[in-house]
Image: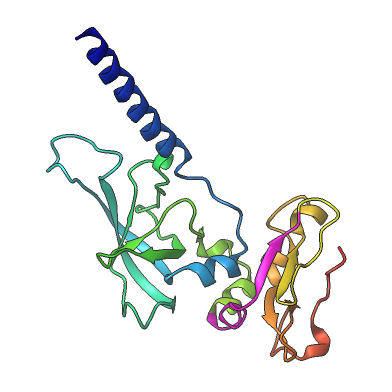
């Protein structure tokens, strides 16, 4: 009987340990260029947050960090991606705490956000700390313009982050993201002003401004 109780306790502690590891490690995110975030998202919109509500899976009887959700009511201003799957977004959903990857959005001011998210199997737009979410006013003019068309043009390209030398492209469709190396920040010139676009020969390279004539591509394969 004692052995049975010991085994039950050990099993319970193991299960708890696995749940805690999942909870703590569930929000491990790799840094992403806005183009990467755009290309991997199902939905990309500009919106203002107009309301907030806790959606409880337990009828409000207890708080469940794993299953409860925060529902933000949004006023969509513009949709950049996702037209074919959802005509308009009225709500976005996130986990109730940052530890579970939930994001906190401002509902009391007139701030507008760029929101990137994914569609769940239930049709809900899900957002979290691993999504690219930023006040609209903090985006550069180049980023705002690239959201309209140019990021989509580069979705067949791959952006590889370079942290230390040596680093080089491993395929023709690679663009090296060297902001962290050259400017000691991931919010450097490539993040703010450039997009990685496929050229006519199938290779990819950084580009800034206008319609992309091939001679104006920025070649930084050797940082």
Q: Nearer the viewer, residue 167 or 100?
A: 167
In the rendered image, the quadrant that contains the C terminus is bottom right
Q: Is residue 213 left or right of residue 151?
A: right
Q: Is residue 139 left or right of residue 119?
A: right
177 falls in the magenta region: no
Compared with residue 7, is residue 28 higher up or lower down, i.e. above or below? below
Q: Nearer the viewer, residue 219 or 1?
A: 1
Can you give x and y, in whole percent of width and height, for residue 86 in the image?
Answer: 32, 77
Compared with residue 193, is residue 216 higher up or lower down, i.e. above or below? below
Compared with residue 55, is residue 207 higher up or lower down, i.e. above or below? below
Instruction: Write the start and end of the magenta stretch as one range.
Output: 148-162
| Residue occupying image coordinates x 82% and y 56% | 182
Can you give x and y, in whole percent of width and height, for residue 9 in the image?
Answer: 29, 17
Can you give x and y, in whole percent of width and height, for residue 102 in the image?
Answer: 39, 47
Residue 51 in which image quadrant: bottom left
| Residue occupying image coordinates x 59% and y 70% | 35
155 falls in the magenta region: yes
In the rendered image, the quadrant that contains the N terminus is top left
| Residue occupying image coordinates x 83% and y 69% | 221
| Residue occupying image coordinates x 76% and y 57% | 162
Q: Is residue 208 left or right of residue 139?
A: right
């Amino acid at each position: 009987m004692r052995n049975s109780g010991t085994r039950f306790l050990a099993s319970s502690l193991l299960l708890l340990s696995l749940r805690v590891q999942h909870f703590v490690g569930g929000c491990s995110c790799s840094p992403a260029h806005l183009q990467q975030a755009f290309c991997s998202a199902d939905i990309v919109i500009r919106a203002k947050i107009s309301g907030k509500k806790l959606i409880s899976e337990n009828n409000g009887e207890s708080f469940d960090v794993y299953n409860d959700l925060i529902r933000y009511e949004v006023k969509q201003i513009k949709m950049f991606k996702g037209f074919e799957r959802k005509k308009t977004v009225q709500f976005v959903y996130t986990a109730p705490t940052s530890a579970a990857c939930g994001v906190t959005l401002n509902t009391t001011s007139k701030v507008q956000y760029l929101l990137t998210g994914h569609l769940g199997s239930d049709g809900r737009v899900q957002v979290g700390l691993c999504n690219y979410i930023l006040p609209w006013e903090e985006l550069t003019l180049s980023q705002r313009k690239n959201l309209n068309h140019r990021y989509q043009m580069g979705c067949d390209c791959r952006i590889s982050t370079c942290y230390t030398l040596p680093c080089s492209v491993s395929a023709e469709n690679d663009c090296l993201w060297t902001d962290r190396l050259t400017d000691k920040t991931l919010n450097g010139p490539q993040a703010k002003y450039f997009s990685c676009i496929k050229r006519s020969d199938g290779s990819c390279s950084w580009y800034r401004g206008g319609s992309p004539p091939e001679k104006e591509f920025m070649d930084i394969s050797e940082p």
